Amino acid sequence: MDKNINQLKNKKLFLLDMDGTLYLDHQLIEGTLDFLETLKKQNKRGIYVTNNSSKSVLDYVKKLGNLGIHANETDFYTSSMATARYLNEFHPGKKVYCMGTESLKLELKSKGIQIANDREDQVEVVLLGYDTELTSQKLYDVCWLLKKDLPYLATNPDYVCPVEFGFVPDCGSFAEMIHHATKKSPIFIGKPHPRMIEYAIEATHYSKADAVMIGDRIYTDILSGINANITTICVLSGETTLEDINRSAIKPDYILDSIKDLYEIIKN
């Protein structure tokens, strides 16, 4: 934390978490639009890197548009995209039971993943997502399937998702609940594993030295940046508090109250 914060002015690729960093639920965090406009003026790149697998990239384009942020599909790298790449690389052609939203299923299908219609549909891989359409039947089906020796994956390990009034359970909490019933835990694909950050950087012409990861969770956003060996900024506008950071072994390079502070740093 003793690093010169003005070094951030030299960064060219800003990997941006969204929930808790740029907005809370449907409410923009102050400074977000000014920050994004400054990136454009300075010919720098922002990539939206999110573990939230409940929405497809097109859903996110629409959501950001409704918040006044113009973006296109190439501006995103999501845990859904990383999961599709992982499935195609390590489980090519296998049929996946997805405990997730219809948007997640459509996103995976668009990347060539076979999605099972139900638990009886020759399932070869079990996948959890941040399922905002969760039913007790889906939980029952996952527990039933995990009695078999099937590969078991999850899009992200986040315990909670920030919303306007506080937090709601995320994919990591679902995995914990299922672990209590089955004693099985998934392989998590999204942050903090470095693959998602490295995939996102690969999609640009920048290097790791150019990149900085900005997010509100130390155990996903910040740890993913550390694992990928890039600069990290933790903002205190979402899940993590200063007390959390002081207690944690995971230390970001910089701590800021919000994206507004980063805007103030880079604007000149």
Image (spheres, grey):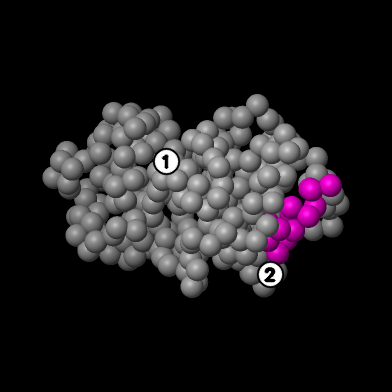
Whether 43 is drawn above or below 69: the answer is: above
Which quarter of the rendered picture does the N terminus lie within?
bottom right
* Residue at the image point whose x is 29% and y is 28% from the top: 93
Q: Which residue is mark 2?
A: 242
For disc 2, the neighbor class at 10 Å (few under 14, some 14 to 19, many from 20) is: some
Specify the segment rendered in magenta: 254-268
| Occupied quadrant, residue 207 | top right
The percent coordinates of residue 185 (x first, y second) are 37, 55
Q: Which residue is mark 1?
A: 58
* Residue at the image point whose x is 53% and y is 62% from the top: 27
Horizontal side, residue 102 vs residue 245: left or right: left
The percent coordinates of residue 235 (x first, y second) are 66, 60
Q: Secondary structure at mark 1?
A: helix
In the image shown, does 72 or 211 lie closer to the viewer? 72
As drawn, the residue found furthest toward the left would be: 120
| Occupied quadrant, residue 201 | top right
Q: CA distance from mark 1 to mark 2?
A: 34 Å
**Residue 240 is a magenta residue:** no
The percent coordinates of residue 143 (x first, y second) are 24, 57
* Residue at the image point whose x is 65% and y is 26% from the top: 205
For disc 1, the neighbor class at 10 Å (few under 14, some 14 to 19, many from 20) is: some
Q: Nearer the viewer, mark 1 or mark 2?
A: 1
Q: Amino acid at mark 1?
A: Leu
In the image shown, does 43 or 77 lie closer to the viewer? 43
